[in-house]
Image: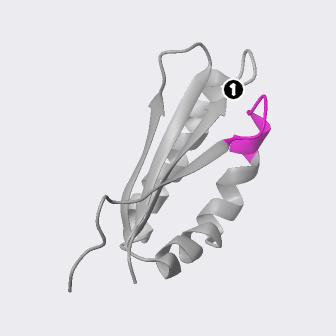
Amino acid sequence: MSKVTFVSRMLIKEGREAEFVQRCKALTEVVRKTEPDTLYYEFFKLREPRRYAVIESFASAAAEEAHMTSPALAEHAPGIVDCLAEPYVREYLDPFEAPKG
């Protein structure tokens, strides 16, 4: 299976940025410790006010599914989503060429 990579962009409610960052850091820590097939997982503050993004990359679709159904995400995601001013936008990223092999 080929890896799965995407970026999700988010707008945070006014006054909720510190909480959002704290929740994202907590989730990132758990993901990095418990999900070996998560190749990359990092949140970023964008240059526009209250805008953030996360880049996620998984070794396979199965690894993405394992993350999306993980106890860590079930615990942390509701609080993160509650900080959002609008639904996040996910964009999948595909390599120029499929890996050979």
Where residue 20 sits in the image (x, y, percent)? 63, 32
Secondary structure state at the residue bearing disc 1: loop
Image coords of residue 17 (percent x, y): 63, 23
Query: Residue pushed farthest front?
Result: 97
**Coloration of the structure image:** one colour
Which corner quadrant of the image does residue 8 belong to?
top right
Q: Quadrant of residue 57?
A: bottom left
Depth check: 52 or 90 in front? 90
Q: Residue at x 51, y 81 (%)?
A: 62
Q: Residue at coordinates 21% horizontally, 80% vertically from top-left?
A: 100
Few, some or many residues within 10 Å of mark 1 (<14, 14–19, 20+): many
- Nearer to the camera, 32 or 44: 44
- The image shows residue 12, relative to residue 58, as above or below, that is above
Task: Determine whether, in the image, residue 87 is placed left or right of residue 20.
Answer: right
Residue at horizontal 55%, vertical 42%? 24
The spot of residue 35 in percent (x, y) is 43, 70
Q: Main secondary structure of the magenta part?
A: loop
Residue plotted at (48% across, 23% down)? 46
* Quarter of the N terminus within the rendering: bottom left
Residue 82, x across and y down, in percent: 79, 39
The stretch drawn in magenta includes residue 82: yes
Look at the picture and state if 37 lies above or below 83.
Answer: below
Residue type pointed to by label 1: Ile
Residue 37 colored magenta?
A: no
Residue matched to label 1: 12
Q: Which residue lies most toward the left here?
A: 101
Image quadrant holding the C terminus, namely: bottom left
Q: How many marks?
A: 1
Residue placed most toward the observer, 70 or 63 = 63
Which residues lie in the magenta part? 79-88
54 above or below 66? above
